[in-house]
Amino acid sequence: MEKRVYNFSAGPANLPLAALEEAQRDLLALPGVGSSVMEISHRSKAFTQIVEQTEANLRTLLAIPDNYHVLLLQGGAQMQFAMVPMNLLRGTGKSADYILTGSWGKKAAQEARTQGDVRVAFDSGDTNYNRLPGPGELDLNPDAAYVHITSNETIQGVQFPEEPNTGDVPLVSDSSSDILCRPIDIERYGILYACAQKNVGPSGVTLVIIRDDLVERSADDLPSMLSYPVQAKGKSLYNTPPTFAIYMVKLVTEWLMREFGGLDKMAEHNRRKAAMLYEAIDQSDGFYAGHALPECRSIMNVAFRLANADLDGPFLDQAAERGLTALKGHRSVGGCRASIYNAMPIEGVEALRDFMIDVRGKN
């Protein structure tokens, strides 16, 4: 059997080993069903139970109130870049506020402009998105259709420690790369969406948590697949869903509850992992430098660079030789990036930290 490496990919990312092993064990035949989850009807009792249990797990972990729908859709976060303005902005005569703290927020705003008027309430592009808005920097419109944030920018390694105050304007969040990494107050949000392939499951399924009143706001003339009311009425089963991906979300959420008992312990674990790497960066006497300002750092994606860029290639090659893979930074930031989502074990982070210290000592 091929030895597993420590995979620091930004996504699709590593999944909990226990969830993979359970899926492997029951891949040919689900207990009590006799067929693979990839072979059964999405209308069957067996799959309906999988969908219902997956939703129940998510509601428990995130303390989702009854006045929110939980949808398991397709198309990734980038489909939501369009669905949100199609349902909440188009035809309203209002504008939407976008807070830009990285590449994904910028892409979301670009897509929204195809559906209506977009105002940029903050943009840290002048510093290559290394920070969050400071006091008094947010230019919010109290009559906006909604305010959009990206809670964690995967590429730049910038994360909101808490939600911005948007008053009575609904807050919409792309939480693709930090959903389930810590407790959040769902009632602060109108819509929270996340592609699964970071913390929730494999690629192919997208989680959308949406408040009832925002479902009702949608226009009647939208294509069915892009309509929140249609998807909500269908309870994630309007069309054939990504059955295996949803099944994996069920296994991942069960692992999280079983191993950590909830998001409080998960958050402690994640902060501990991130602290190891940031300490190695900060105590390197300039050999390493983090991209994000210290007060804005992500606990999911640690973006850093070596002071001598000529060492980037050897660093990545030697890391791979030690089983530390997918550490190359995004081209817009350069350097390295360690994505340490929920399923990254503490041993993997310790191995990377020790390697970083070793490389610094030798150079």
Image: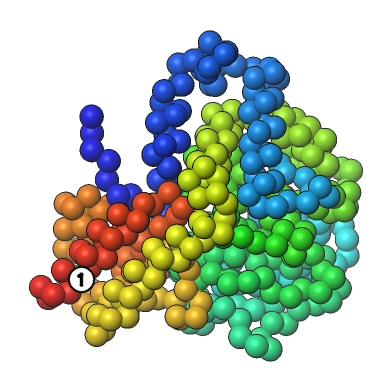
Q: Residue shown at 83%/50% (left/top)?
A: 67
Q: Horizontal placement of 101 versus 51: left or right? A: left
Above or below, comparing residue 44 to residue 73 in the picture = above
Above or below, comparing residue 175 to residue 309 in the picture = above
Q: In which quarter of the image is the N terminus?
A: top left
Displayed quadrant of residue 238: top right
Q: Horizontal placement of 233 versus 256: left or right? A: right
Q: Residue shown at 25%/80% (left/top)?
A: 284
Query: Is residue 73 something that shows in the picture?
Result: no
Q: Residue shown at 39%/39% (left/top)?
A: 17
Q: In which quarter of the image is the C terminus?
A: bottom left
**How far across and down, in percent of the image, does residue 212 sit?**
85, 50
Q: Relative to the observer, which residue lies in front, 249 or 261? A: 261
Provide the residue designation for mark 1. Answer: 357
Outermost residue to the bottom = 136
Query: Is residue 221 something that shows in the picture?
Result: yes
**How far across and down, in percent of the image, does residue 318 sit?**
16, 58
| Three-letter amino acid code of the residue under disc 1 | Ile
Above or below, comparing residue 75 to residue 310 in the picture = above
Above or below, comparing residue 141 to residue 227 in the picture = below
Outermost residue to the left = 362
Q: Relative to the observer, which residue lies in front, 104 or 20? A: 20
Q: Relative to the observer, which residue lies in front, 97 or 295? A: 295
Displayed quadrant of residue 204: top right
